[in-house]
Amino acid sequence: MRRFSLSILFLLAAFAAGCAALPPAPAPKTPEEKVASTPVSSSGAVVALADSARTDVAAGNYASASAALERALRIEPRNARLWHELAQLKLKQGDASQAANMAARSNSWAGADKVLRAANWRVIGEAKRALGDETGANAAFDKADKLIR
Amino acid sequence: MKRFLRVALLIALLAAALFALYLDWRVTDEFTGRRWALPARVYARPLELFPGAALTPPQLVQELELLGYKRGIEGMEPGRFEPRAGGVDLVTRPFAFWDGAQPALALRLEFRDDRLDALWDQGNYTELKLARLDPLPIGGIYPAHNEDRVLVKLDEAPRELVSALLAMEDRQFYSHIGVDPRGVARAALSTLTGRGVQGGSTLTQQLVKNYFLTPERTLRRKATEMLMALLLELHYAKDEILEAYLNEIYLGQDRNRAIHGFGLAAHYYFDKPLNRLTLADSALLVGMVKGPALYDPHRHPQRALERRNLVLSEMRGLGYITPEQALRAKAEPLGVVAKPGIGTSPHPAFLELVRRQLRQDYDEDDLRSEGLKIFTTLDPHAQRAAERALTNRLAILDRARKDGQPPLEGAAVVTSTATGEVQALVGGRDVRYQGFNRALDAQRPVGSLLKPAVYLAALSRPQQYTLVTPLSDERFVWKSRGAPDWEPQNYDRKYHGRVPLRTALAESYNVATARLGTELGIPKVLETMHRLGIEHELPPYAATLLGAVDLTPFEVTQMYQTLASGGFRTPLRAIREVLTADGQPLKRYGLSVEQVVEPAPVYLVTAAMQDVVREGTARGLTAFLSPTLNIAGKTGTTDELRDSWFAGFTGDYLAVAWVGYDDNRPSRLTGASGAMTVWGELMAPIAREPLVPPLPENVEQVTIDPRSGLRAGFGCDGAVELPFLAGTAPVAVSDCAAPPPPAPEKKEKPPAKSWWQRLFE
């Protein structure tokens, strides 16, 4: 009997905790964040290389990060996500023109993945802004918005 | 008179002193840094090992054997492997890569369905995600006289090697002052008695001779040599001099590469590091010092063996080794590895490309002396496939001719479609020949290879042209001011009336293409060619449309690279990274892409190029490759059948092949009968991925009845799926149950401003 009531108590507590976790909506994620939270690939080798690239980026070691991503791309040349990661990296490196081109390349392999395509258009938008093309940047951001609306 | 003599003597002494000072300066200046010019070492791509990699056990074993891995695992000794049921065990060699070092790994590889299935680290029984083999050295960029060496320290040299050297070349080494008085006396005697200037050299003198001087034999040079030897001894310790000697001495010739120093000689003759040489090995190398050509163990094994045993006897006589040691060593075979001579590189044509790309960033002198490590994109498997295909196919083509024609020549380039990395390059049928590099330097008329650019320019105007737009293949005369009239002919000398656009490309109709190109405007088409990556100037004439322009196979490859990567121009690269001699990262050559054409028209022209292989001029390719690869390609044939070309790509590789004669005489081959056979044989062992370009969002597939060019309706046999830009496909449906209506002159309903058009604006 004691055990029974205890388990009810636990159930109730769990329910309450579940309720507490549900309602307050988390801050809306950008497409880039959504993309980053999904696995890069089903290949362990590619995941390992993308992870090491991320570590390199965090340490500011962009050359190593590029090398790791390009190594991953040689394994999976049609992986839209890897092209996107390279585009992001180029943006960080200040190479806006390559960032836009890599994002476009990612889009060509992205298929029906609207979130990834939106993220790519946002990279293109930022790249165009960096290149001083405000109109082009706004058009790119609009495209991103339309894709995830 | 006396006074004059005294002045003369004084002047002579002064001159001698100045000369000695000059020599002293040279000795100390050049010897103190003791920096040997070290060649840049060039490596192929390392083989990546990971679960899922397209790799079979035989391919792996081939790569391991190429790398010189030996059969039989011996503990953790690197560079060994052993095939097992379902897999291969191996211990990798440690290697410092651009992005960090990988230690020796004991790996167990398991395979399934032509793929690497699992990768185990036997050191700690964990499954690995990724590992690399050490990269295959594919040559070097060498200093003057192609001197090659592997620097060693004195303490790395086996004691027996040093004692053998002293026994044979200079027994008084540790006691003399640089020259041996008795040797000098002997040399003087032989000179005076007219037997020439010879003999009596100490190690120090030999070093001076090799290091500082030219190999002429005059009395003056001999005197200089002695003086410098004395100076060298004055400034440096015996061991420093000995170490320099070990690294400097010339020990043989590998084709055009000069083997210097015992460190490299140990690798070259025995495939061992210096410290692992046996007594017999050491004796053999020391015996060769006197005459590396005379005692070459590859060419004169008997003479080399006798010389080796003489060295061993001398060592025993001096008490450096025991009689038993001598006896045992004499009983050993020569033990030299039978390596095919590779000279400065087994793949000189690819190396030339590497050197040219490096020269954009580095001084030629640095390349030849700084010991840089160059990591390239060469795939040894693809390179071998390309070399074999070219030599084999040219031999077959030659045999089929039997009319006293000289041997044909050819060239081939293979790249990765996604990254533009050059994986193989062959510059002629003698693949080891270092001379004329046809892949890079043979400028030849390209013929129909440029046609895809004409059709791409057309398909970039989707409101006017689709894959089924009828084109006119009727007699055509192009008149332009200041130029003779131009009347192109088809290969079969016939006209074909109205043909669908895709058929005109598939069958490579010249007349229809010329009409199309002039309709589009020649400058417009040339601009498309430049966009695709042709940097070479293109003559602004109509004949250029049909390829009356000279390009190299490499330039053609760059153009097709853009098509193969969906409209993204990707510069062809042969180098990935450069490291300094001590392993510090120096430069990385990264991937870059530039979207130069919209994806949709590239997708359409690629579909038409797939028709070339499926049903057009390249349908013979099925003899070599499965139709499931969906290859896109184009044949090229030039006037009077001089040049035979084929360019094409699968999902993973792009290759361009050329066959013809250096002197431009007709090869009497079409693209399909010549270069295409090279291409097919080259691609067969390497291509794995079918070509499935990503469908652009504004392209739709529509089922078309090829007879009417309309949408296939009920009862249409042989209907084909063709891609169209959304809104540009024919609207009318072909009623195949009824007799086919006449082909429409124009599309029924050119849609006004479709959504995709607005998209681009």
Image: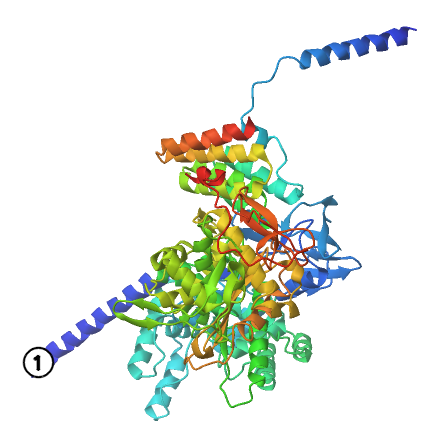
Q: Position of residue B328 (x, y in %)?
A: 69, 76
Residue sitting farthest toward the right: A1
Which amino acid lies under the numbered mark 1 shown in the image of this protein?
Answer: Phe
Q: Quadrant of residue B334?
A: bottom right
| Total numbered badges shown on the rendered structure | 1
Check the image and report above or below for B409 versus B703: below
Q: Quadrant location of the C terminus of chain B?
A: top left
| Residue B700 rendering spot, x and y as whole percentages | 58, 45
Q: Confirm whether residue B568 shows in the render.
A: yes
Task: Give the labeled residue for mark 1.
Answer: B4
The local secondary structure at tag 1 comes to: helix
Quick check: B379 left or right of A99? right
Image quarter where the N terminus of chain B lies is: bottom left
Q: Compared with residue B704, is residue B67 higher up or lower down, i.e. above or below? A: below
Classify residue B354 by image quadrant. bottom left
Q: Residue, x 76% and y 12% (percent of image)?
A: A15
In the rendered image, is residue B154 in sight?
no
Subunit bearing disc 1:
B
Percent x, y of residue B438: 44, 72
Above or below residue A101? Residue B172 is below
Query: For this rendering, which residue is in front, B694 or B216?
Result: B694
